[in-house]
Image (cartoon, coloured by chain):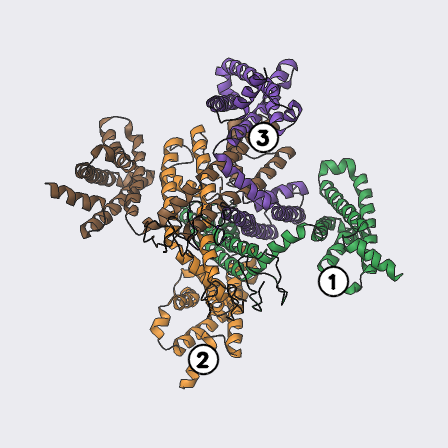
Chain colours: A orange, B brown, C green, D purple
Amino acid sequence: MKINRNRLHEIIFEAETREGKMFDLILMAAILVSVVVVILDSVASVRLRYHMLFITLEYIFTGLFTIEYALRIYSVKSPVRYITSFFGIIDLISILPTFLAILVPGAQSLLVIRIFRLLRIFRVLKLSRYHKASYYLIRSLQASRHKIFVFLATVLTIVVIMGALMYLIEGADSDFTDIPTGIYWAVVTITTVGYGDISPVTALGQMMASFLMIVGYAIIAVPTGIITAEIVRTGKFDNTISCPNCSKEGHDSMASYCKYCGHKL
Amino acid sequence: MKINRNRLHEIIFEAETREGKMFDLILMAAILVSVVVVILDSVASVRLRYHMLFITLEYIFTGLFTIEYALRIYSVKSPVRYITSFFGIIDLISILPTFLAILVPGAQSLLVIRIFRLLRIFRVLKLSRYHKASYYLIRSLQASRHKIFVFLATVLTIVVIMGALMYLIEGADSDFTDIPTGIYWAVVTITTVGYGDISPVTALGQMMASFLMIVGYAIIAVPTGIITAEIVRTGKFDNTISCPNCSKEGHDSMASYCKYCGHKL
Amino acid sequence: MKINRNRLHEIIFEAETREGKMFDLILMAAILVSVVVVILDSVASVRLRYHMLFITLEYIFTGLFTIEYALRIYSVKSPVRYITSFFGIIDLISILPTFLAILVPGAQSLLVIRIFRLLRIFRVLKLSRYHKASYYLIRSLQASRHKIFVFLATVLTIVVIMGALMYLIEGADSDFTDIPTGIYWAVVTITTVGYGDISPVTALGQMMASFLMIVGYAIIAVPTGIITAEIVRTGKFDNTISCPNCSKEGHDSMASYCKYCGHKL
Amino acid sequence: MKINRNRLHEIIFEAETREGKMFDLILMAAILVSVVVVILDSVASVRLRYHMLFITLEYIFTGLFTIEYALRIYSVKSPVRYITSFFGIIDLISILPTFLAILVPGAQSLLVIRIFRLLRIFRVLKLSRYHKASYYLIRSLQASRHKIFVFLATVLTIVVIMGALMYLIEGADSDFTDIPTGIYWAVVTITTVGYGDISPVTALGQMMASFLMIVGYAIIAVPTGIITAEIVRTGKFDNTISCPNCSKEGHDSMASYCKYCGHKL
C-alpha cells in the first residue's frame, strides 16, 4: 500500500516518469477542453444547440477532477498542507461550482467560477522546461518589488489627485459625475488605454488631460527600466562558476575555459 | 521644555523610536480614511445617505491635522523653513479648505482640494524601507533630465506641428475646429491613448494620423532607453564600499583602487 | 545547359553579381506596384475609374511572377524542397488567386489573398545589408522564446479569467454578452488599445477594469525587459574575433583567452 | 566692414558672447509668442475679439524675422549653402506665408504653415547645454537605424496584410469599406492607439484583432530593446580615457585614478 501511494504521488505530482508525463499531458488537455466548454456555454446561440452536450461533458470533467482531487489528497504526505495550498484551493474551486449548481437553486451564475481551472495549467508548466524561464522572471519581479511599489504608489496618487481635479474642472454636469468616475477616467488615460466613454470637453480639462497623457507616456519608461535592469542583472549570474585558478566569475554558460587566464573551468 | 521639543520632533518627524513609528502608522491611516471620505462625499447617492457622518469625520480629521500642524511648527528649529517647504505647504492645504468652507460662502467647491492630503503619504514613505528604492528612481530620473527634456521638447514640437497640419487638412468643419483641438488630438494620438472623440475622416488626414501613431509607437522607446540605461548604471554603484582614505562611495563592483584618490579599497 | 542553370540560380537567388542586384531591384519594384494595385482596386471610387487598367496590370504581373516561379523551380537543385519551403509557398500564393478567379466563378473574393505577395519583399531583404540587423533581432527573439512563452501564457490566462469575471459582474444584459466578448474586451484593455466599443458601467466592473489596465500597463515592462536584456547580451558578442586554435567566435570583448579551448586569442 | 560681418555672425549664429546669448533668448521668446499667436488665431471665439491685435503682432514678427533672415544671409560666408540648409528653409517658411497672404488672394489658409517656425527653437537648443544630450540620443538612433528599418518594414508588412485580411473577413458592408481603411485600422490597433471609430464585429474579425493587439503589445519591446541597448553602449563610452599605466578603459567620468591599478589618470 505504501509503495502504491509513493507511485501515485510520482505520477500525479511529478513528471520524471513516462506515466507522470502522460498524466500531465492528459490533465492539460482535460483542463483546456473543459475551459473551452465553459466559454462556449456562455454564448447564447451555441448554448441553444449544444447545451446537453456541454452539461454531459461538464459532469464527466467534474467527475475526473474530483477523482484526481481525491487521489491527490490520498497520495500526499500532509493532506492539510495540500488542501490549504494555492493549487489545492484552485483544485477545489475547479469542481465545487458544479456540485453547488446541483444542490443550491440559483447557483447557476457561479458556474463561471469554473474558469479558474485555467490556473491549473501552471501546475503542469511548473514541472516543464519553462520552469527556469518562469523562475528568472519571478526572481526579477521580486528583486524589484520595492521599486515597483514606489512606482505604483506614485501612479495611484497621481490618478486620485487628477481624478478629483478633473471633477472640479469639468463639473458634476459633465461626464465626470463624481470623483470615483474621475479616478476611473484617470486610470484609463494614464495607462494609455483611452476608451473614450468619458472625455473632457472644457479647454482647461483638455489641457490637464494632455498633461496626464504625456506623464503616462513618459513614466511607463520607469517600470520598464526597473525590470529590464533586474533581468540584465539576473541574466549575468546565469552561471555562478568561478575559475579555479584566478577565481574570476561571470563566465558564459557555454564556456569551458576561463576567459581571463585560460585555465580549465 | 527643550527636551520636550526634541522629543516631539523625534516622534513627529522621525521613525526610529517606537512612538515615532506608531505616530506614522496612525497618521497614514488618518490620511487614507480622510481621502476616502472626500472621494465618497462626491458621489451623489452616497452623500445623500451619509453626508452628516462625512461632515463629522471631516471636522475630526481637520481638528487632528490642525493640532499636528501646530505641533510640527512648534517642534521644528526653523518654523519659517518648514512652513515654506513642500510638505509644509501640503500640510496647510490639507486643513485650509475646511476652514474656508465654513467662513466663505460658496467655497464648498474648494473642498475637493483636500485630496492633496494624499501627498502627505509620501512623507511617511520617506522614512521607511522604500526610501532607498525611491532614492534610486529619483536619482535615475535626475541624471537623465537633460535627455528627457530634449525628448519632451521634440514630442511637443511634433504635437504642435501635427495639430496645426491636421487643422489645415481636415478643415475647420471637421472635428478639428481649431489648432488647440488639433494639438489635443495629436497628444491623444502620439501617446497612444486614442479616445476617438476626435478622429480624421479624409484619406490624407488618416495617412498623417497613421504616420503620427507609428512615430509615437516607435519613440516611446527613447525615454524607456534613457531611463533603463540610467537605472542599469545606478544599479552598478549599489556597491556600498567607501574608500578607507577619502571615504568616497560609488565604486564599481570590480574596482580594486579608489577612483577618486587612488588608495587601495 | 548546366552552366545556364547555375547562372540563372545566381541571378535569381543571389545578389552578388550586377545582374543579380538588378533582378532584385526590378522584382522589388514589381512586388510593390502589384501590391499597391491590389490595395487601390479595393477602393470603390478608384475601381470604378481604373478597373480595366488594374486588371491589365494584374495579368502582366501574374504573367511575370509565373515565369519567375517557373525559372526558380527550373534553376534550383531540389525543386520539391523549394516548392514546399516558406518562400516557395508564398511565391505560389502570389499567382494562384488570379488563375483561380478566371477559372472558378465566385473566387473573386480570394483576390485579396494576393496581398501576401508583400512577404516576398523579405526574400530580397534577406540578401541585403539589413541581413545582419534582422539576424540579431531574430536571434534575440529566439533566445528569449521560453520567457516570452511564459509571459504570453500568463497574459492569456489573465485575459480569459478577467473576461469571464467581467461577464459575471456586468451581466449578460450589458456590453459583455458572453465570455468570448469579455475575453475580447480584456485583450483590448490589457494591451492598452481601448476601442471603447465595449466598456464596463457598474462600479465593481470599473474597478476590475482599472485593475486590469494597471496590470497591463505594468507588465508590458516584462517582454521589454526580456528582449532588451537579450539584445544587450547579443550585442556584446558583436566582437568578430575567432580563436586561432579552434576558430570559434562569440568571445567577450574583454576576453584574452578562448573560452572554448583555452588558447590565447 | 569685415569685422562687422564677423561680429554679426558671432551674435546671430553663436552663443558664446553675452550679446549672442541675449540674441538667442530674444529670438526664442519671439518664436514662442508668434507661434502662440498662430494657434490662438485659429480659435473662432478668440479671433473675433483679438484679430486686429493678432494681425498687428504677426506683421511685427514677420518684419523682425525678415530682418533677421536678411542679416543671416549677409553675415554667413556662403549664403547659398545657408539658404538651402535645413534651418535656412525653415527660416524662409517662417516669413513667406504672411507675404503670400498679402499678395495672393485665398492664400489665407497657408498661414497655418507659419507653425513650422517652432522648429527654429531647435537652432537655439543646438547651442545650449542640451546639445550633448541631443547628440547622444541622435547617435543612438543612428547606430540602430538598420535594426529600426527592419522593425518598421515588419510592422508595415503586418499592417498591410492584416488590413487586407480584415477587409476580406468583415466584408465591404462593415466599417472596413476598403483595404486602405483596413490598413488604417491595423495601424490604429497595432500601435495600441485604438480610437474605436472602426472596430470588428464578427467573431473571426475579433479574434484576428485580438491577435494583432497582442502582437502589437509584444513587439513594442523590440524597438525599446534596440534603442536601450544602443544608449547603454553609447553611455559606456562617455569617457574614452585609458589608464597611462595599465591602459584599461571604461573609467567613470568623475574618476581621477585608475580603478584597476590605482595610477593617476
Q: Nearer the viewer, mark 2 or mark 1?
A: 1
Q: Amino acid at mark 2?
A: Leu
Q: Is residue C80 left or right of residue B85?
A: right
Q: Nearer the viewer, residue A48 or C239?
A: C239
Same-chain status of marks 3 and 2: no
Q: Is residue B222 left or right of residue A168?
A: right
Q: Which residue is mark 2?
A: A8
Question: Residue C178 at x, y = what percent?
Answer: 51, 53
Q: Residue at x 20, y 44 (%)?
A: B12
Chain bearing tag 2 is A
Q: Secondary structure at mark 1?
A: loop
Q: Are marks 2 and 1 in contact (CB under 8 Å)?
A: no
Judged from this view, the residue extending furthest toward the front is D245
Q: Amino acid at mark 3?
A: Met
Q: Secondary structure at mark 2?
A: helix
Place residue A186 in its image quadrant: top left
Q: Which residue is mark 3?
A: B166
Marks 2/1: CA–CA distance: 46 Å
Question: Residue C230 at x, y = what percent?
Answer: 54, 56
Marks 1/3: CA–CA distance: 48 Å
Height in image: C19 above or below D184?
Answer: below
Task: Mark yes or no: residue D194 visible.
Answer: no
Q: Are marks 1 and 3 in contact (CB under 8 Å)?
A: no
Same-chain status of marks 2 and 1: no
